[in-house]
Structure formats: structure tokens, C-alpha cells
Amino acid sequence: MRDFEIRHYEIIDSTNTEARRLSQVEGGDRLVVVADRQTAGKGRRGRSWESDEGGNLYFSVLLRPDFSTEKAPMLTLVMAYSVAEVIREYLPSVQIKWPNDLVVDGKKLCGILTEMHLCESKIEDVIIGVGINVNCSRFSEGLSDAATSMSMQLGKQVEAGVLLAAVLEAFEKNYREFCQVQTLSFLQGAYHCLLANYEKQVRVLAPGQEYDGLALGINETGELLVQKEDGSVEHVYAGEVSVRGIYGYV
Ligand code: BTN
């Protein structure tokens, strides 16, 4: 596998959007789009991602994998795990909130937005966008109770470029393993050690249904196993669901 190619922008609308444009124009693979600031950063569920402050990380990895569509959501978990592996060197208490957030102290530190595009029902590309609150010193009003940054936690600034290089190295290693086995079996045990929801009571909010249960961890395809009060175990697919702790965000 060849190395990732990095394209850096001082300012862009959204690194995910730019990665998609480059995918359509150049048909690239293993391309990383990174920006100092975004004017239209995208979050999950149509939300926006605050991106006007420098010193944070906003990047997207463009991949053109040769596997079937149902495998793509696992890449979100591979990325979350890779970012957590690196951040825990700085902040040992970092945890993964399945499937795509990293949290510290119950507050969000990183979000991941994976977008897949199809051509004749095959994967054309997968774009994994990552936003890490590295050096922000403030959040807008509605976010300040729910979000944190590495510098707020550490009381000092973190070199964003060093962090990005380490994340890409970790992702490259984990992505290579994933491409070989095409399951998450190689990281399941280590993932559970980082999983904030592990053996916790959770509330699953899926379209048209809502239930509580005990999160038992992930299976090898990345679904969250949730045991309901009647003993049955639901396999929660990382699609349009939200998993919350019964008491709060995590
Ligand atoms: C979330 O809602 O938690 C996901 C946020 C993902 C934000 C990142 S920032 C870099 C990349 N470009 C975007 O427009 N969004 C992602």
C-alpha cells in the first residue's frame, strides 16, 4: 500500500466536501485533505461543525476501498480507535463513545463524519472526516458544557501537525490490517478498553423506536450489542441511531 498524500488548505468550505470534489475530478485514493479553518464544516445529522478557530484539526481521508458497502461503516470505528490510540498518549482518560465520538471527562473532544458514495451499488469512495478540538479555548454558548479540547484538558497547547502525523500513521497501520481481515476482530479487545459505553446502561434512539439496555461491547462487524431488560440482545448498526448514557451524554 502506498503512503497517504496530504493536501493542505488554509481555509476551505469543508474538508469532506473538498475530498469529494477531488474524488470526482481526480479519482484519487489515500488522499488526506486538511484545513486550518472551514467555512461550512459538516457534522452528523445535518449539523454544522464549528471550524472558525485555528489550532484545531479538521481533516478528511479519501479512500477507494475494494470491498462491499456494508463494510464501510466499520471504517468509522477504525478511525475512532486510531485517533483514541494517539490521544491517549496525551490524555490517558480519553474514551470512545460508540461509534464516532471521542470524549474526555464526559465532554466531546472529537467527532467523525463518514460519507460513502456509490456507483452502480459499488463503493465509489469513502470519506472519513475528523474534527479534533486540539487547541480551542472557547466554544459557542450551546456547546460549552458538552465540548472540550486537548489544551483545555492539559493546560497547554498541543502541536496539531504532530498529532495529525501520529493519527495518520496509526490509521494507516489499522486500515492495512482491516483490509486484510475485513472485520474488526483485530482490535475488538483493545477497543473495549477504550469504550465509554462498555457495560454501561444506554438508551438507543433509532428511527421509530427507543429502548434502554446494557451495552455489552461490539461484535466483529462493529455493531453495538445491547441487552434489553427481557434478556434479548439487539445488534445496533452504526447508522441513524444515537446511543446515550441513561444519565447524560456518555
Ligand atoms: C460530528 O457531528 O460529530 C462529526 C463532526 C465531523 C467534523 C469533521 S471536521 C473535518 C471534516 N470536514 C467536515 O466538514 N466535517 C468533518
Image: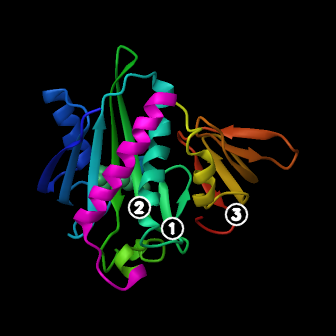
Q: Residue 96: within the magenta?
A: no
**With respect to residue 129, does 143 lie above or below?**
below
Residue 94: mark: 1
Q: Nearer the viewer, residue 186 or 18?
A: 186
Is the stretch drawn in magenta largely helix, strand or loop? helix
Q: Is mark 2 within 8 Å of ligand 1?
A: no
Residue type beneath disc 3: Ile
The numbered disc on residue 246 is 3
- Residue pictured at 85% horizontal, 50% vertical: 229
- As displayed, is residue 88 above or below residue 15? below
Q: Furthest-bottom residue in view?
A: 155
Q: Residue at x 43, y 52 (%)?
A: 82
Task: Give coordinates of residue 215: x percent, y percent.
Answer: 71, 52
Q: Is residue 165 magenta?
A: yes
Q: Quadrant of residue 37?
A: bottom left
Label 2: how many residues lie within 10 Å, few (<14), some (14-19) or many (20+)? many
Residue tagged 2: 86
Q: Quadrant of the N terminus?
A: top left
Q: Which residues are magenta?
A: 153-181
Between the residue at mark 1 and the residue at mark 2, the CA separation in whole angstroms equals 10 Å
Point 35% across, 55% down: residue: 167
